[in-house]
Image: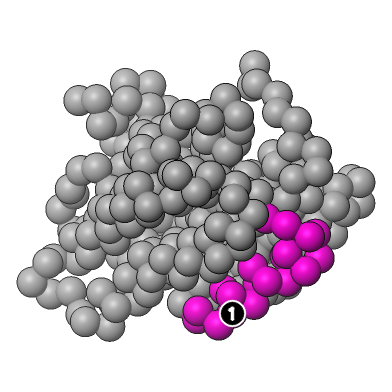
Amino acid sequence: MNPTYDFTGQVAFVTGAGSGMGLAAARAFAASGAAVALADIDEATVTRVAQQLKDEGHQVLALLSDVTDEDQVAAAVDRTVDAFGRLDMAYNNAGIMPPPTDAADESADQFDRVNAVNLRGIWASMKHELRHMRTQGSGAIVNCSSLGGLVGNPGRAAYHATKHGVIGLTKSAALEYGSRGVRINAVCPGTISTPMVDAMVEGGELDRQQAEAGQAIDRLGTAEEIAQAVLWLCSPGAGYVTGIALPVDGGYTAR
């Protein structure tokens, strides 16, 4: 049974909100009473899912945002505040995983692309969220790292570098903003059943049985389980928690 939260009167901003963990978090914020801005690079998808939430009676806003473009990120955050009057919570979720590549063969283009989305995108999102939160003197930000931010993995050097970078970014900003009323944490999902992971399985990049066997809880995680961790980190229940990288990985990193 999941805990319940009351975020009535608060505003949440979620990147990569069109599917997977981002959509699950957006749904959970909305179900808890928050107004939610859903930002995604896929305008048609994010518009469709936002309309579904509106039809269910929730207060939501669909936003086109490519996190590699800082101007688009800034505009999306500003539109959120213009529409709802404030910004209380953010889940910076947008990310990509390139195909596994020998470290000696990885192209500069692939390295730059994964950094642009996974690290620079979170940097830009957090930067512009903080512009508003520091004025308010309050807020909670959760950045999406990965179990890849805590361990290494062959064939994934660039990806893991970005996810380690997210944790460094999170810790440093948390120390800077703790005295200003803003808490900043990272969530580190394990292998989660999402459209991206399903595509990796179908494409032969990931063996589902091996992935399930690699953790103490012998199944893949769900997007909703990540959403619950995000909501807890944004809630008063985590009011004394900042600067952490929380594994939600079925015990993978406990080995």
Q: Residue at x 32, y 21 (%)?
A: 216
Q: Which residue is mark 1?
A: 72
Point out the image quarter for the N terminus: top right
Residue nearer the viewer, 213 or 146: 146
Label 1 secondary element: helix
Amino acid on which the number 1 mark rests in the picture: Gln
Q: Is residue 222 visible in the rendered structure shown here?
A: no
Determine whether, in the image, residue 137 is placed left or right of residue 164.
Answer: right
Pinpoint residue 159: horizontal percent, then vertical percent.
28, 61
Question: What residue span does the magenta drawing correspond to?
Answer: 69-87
Give the answer, above or below, for where 79 lies relative to 190.
Answer: below
Determine whether, in the image, residue 50 is placed left or right of residue 209.
Answer: right
Q: Residues within 10 Å of mark 1 (few under 14, many from 20)?
A: some
Q: Residue furthest left?
A: 104
Snapshot quadrant of residue 235: top right
Determine whether, in the image, residue 247 is placed left or right of residue 137.
Answer: left
Snapshot quadrant of residue 51: bottom right
Residue nearer the viewer, 53 or 142: 142
Q: Residue at x 53, y 60 (%)?
A: 130
Q: Residue at x 69, y 39 (%)?
A: 28
- The prevailing secondary structure element of the residues shown in magenta is helix
Point out the image quarter for the C terminus: top left
Pinpoint residue 46: horizontal percent, then vertical percent.
71, 64
Q: Is residue 82 magenta?
A: yes
Q: Is residue 49 magenta?
A: no
Snapshot quadrant of residue 83: bottom right
Q: Residue at x 78, y 50 (%)?
A: 35
Q: Is residue 115 visible in the rendered structure shown here?
A: yes
Determine whether, in the image, residue 66 is placed left or right of residue 216.
Answer: right
Give the answer, above or below, for where 143 lies relative to 83.
Answer: above
Pinpoint residue 84: horizontal percent, then vertical percent.
80, 59
Pinpoint residue 190: horizontal percent, then vertical percent.
37, 39
